Amino acid sequence: MNYIATEGECLDSIYFKYYGLKFNQNQYDDFMMDNFKLLLKDTLDGGDEVYIREIKPTQEDEIKGLYGIDI
């Protein structure tokens, strides 16, 4: 799915908007790599397209904190 950003949004806020507050490092990394063309921007321009892939939860999903530390 493609999401059209509004002026001033950040990739982080869009990630949490669609995937919720349950942080998953692998999922976050995939999201960032899917949108690598936008990584150099601090904030997005209105009209930037952000790709959001559908994530199917699995039992192996673990919540990891910063630098892969278990929470």
Image (spheres, rainbow, N blue to C red):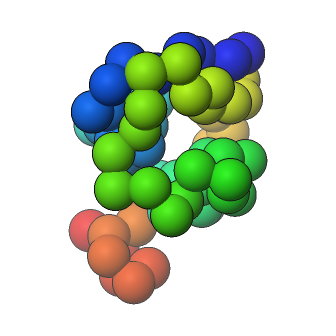
Please state if 4 lies on the left or on the right of 22 as rendered: right
Residue 70: x %, y % from top left = 35, 75
Q: Is residue 63 above or below residue 55?
A: below
Please state if 45 lies on the left or on the right of 4 as rendered: left
Residue 61: x %, y % from top left = 58, 51
Who's the residue at 32% across and 76% down the image?
66
Who's the residue at 44% across and 55% down the image?
41
Quarter where residue 55 is shown:
top right
Quarter where residue 56 is shown:
top right
Residue 46 shows up from this direction: yes
Given residues 23 and 40, the one toward you in this image is 40
Who's the residue at 32% across and 70% down the image?
65
Quarter where residue 2 is shown:
top right
Residue 22: x %, y % from top left = 34, 41
Given residues 27 and 4, the one toward you in this image is 4
Please state if 67 lies on the left or on the right of 38 as rendered: left
Q: Is residue 57 above or below residue 26?
A: above
How many numbered marks appear?
Answer: 0
Q: Quadrant of the C terminus?
A: bottom left
Q: Quadrant of the N terminus?
A: top right
Residue 30 shows up from this direction: no
Residue 47: x %, y % from top left = 53, 19
Who's the residue at 33% across and 45% down the image?
43
Given residues 42 and 61, the one toward you in this image is 42
